[in-house]
Amino acid sequence: MPKKIIKKGKKKRKPKKPSERWKKYKLDGDKVQKTAKFCPRCGSGIFLAESKNKDRIYCGRCHYTEFLLKPKPKEKPKEEKKSEKKK
Ligand SMILES: [Zn+2]
């Protein structure tokens, strides 16, 4: 009896996700605005990715990480009101 050759199923390759770099740009009229920061180490063209918690941004190339300081919740004084009168 010849040994049965069990063919292993080919591993399915997961399609790579595109970096979606274009999403970092925003069109404002005829001007292009960047919504993400460039990496200071790699220079322009390399975007800093936002972490899940959105408390830091990092560069996927050189692993430069920048911590985003969360703005402290301001206590709004209720007494102050804008003295704008609408007509
Ligand atoms: Zn970098």
Image (tube, rainbow, N blue to C red):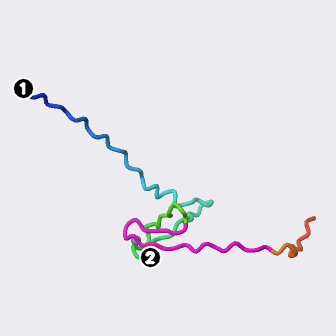
Give the magenta-colored segment's residue range. Answer: 55-76
Observer-nearest of 55 and 17: 55
Estimate how packed mark 1 is, as few (under 14), some (14 to 19) or many (20 or more) residues with alpha carbons within 10 Å.
few
Q: Percent from the top left, x then y, of residue 82? A: 86, 73
User: For mark 2, what is the residue?
Assistant: 40
**Nearest the camera: 67 or 5?**
5
Of 12 and 86, the residue lying toward us: 12
Establish whether ligand 1 lies closer than 8 Å to the Cβ of label 2.
yes
Q: Quadrant of residue 62?
A: bottom left
Residue at 47% across, 64% down: 49
Q: Residues within 10 Å of mark 2 (few under 14, many from 20)?
A: few
User: Residue 23, relative to residue 8: is it above or below?
Assistant: below
Dots 1, 2 in contact, CB < 8 A: no
The percent coordinates of residue 1 (x first, y second) are: 6, 23
- Does residue 27 appear left or right of residue 57 in this picture? right
Q: Is residue 66 magenta?
A: yes
Residue indicated by mark 1 = 2
Tag 2, which secondary structure? loop
Which sits earlier in the primary sequence, circle 1 or circle 2? 1
Tell me the element at label 1.
Answer: loop
Query: What separation in Å lies between label 1 and label 2 (alpha carbons)?
Result: 63 Å
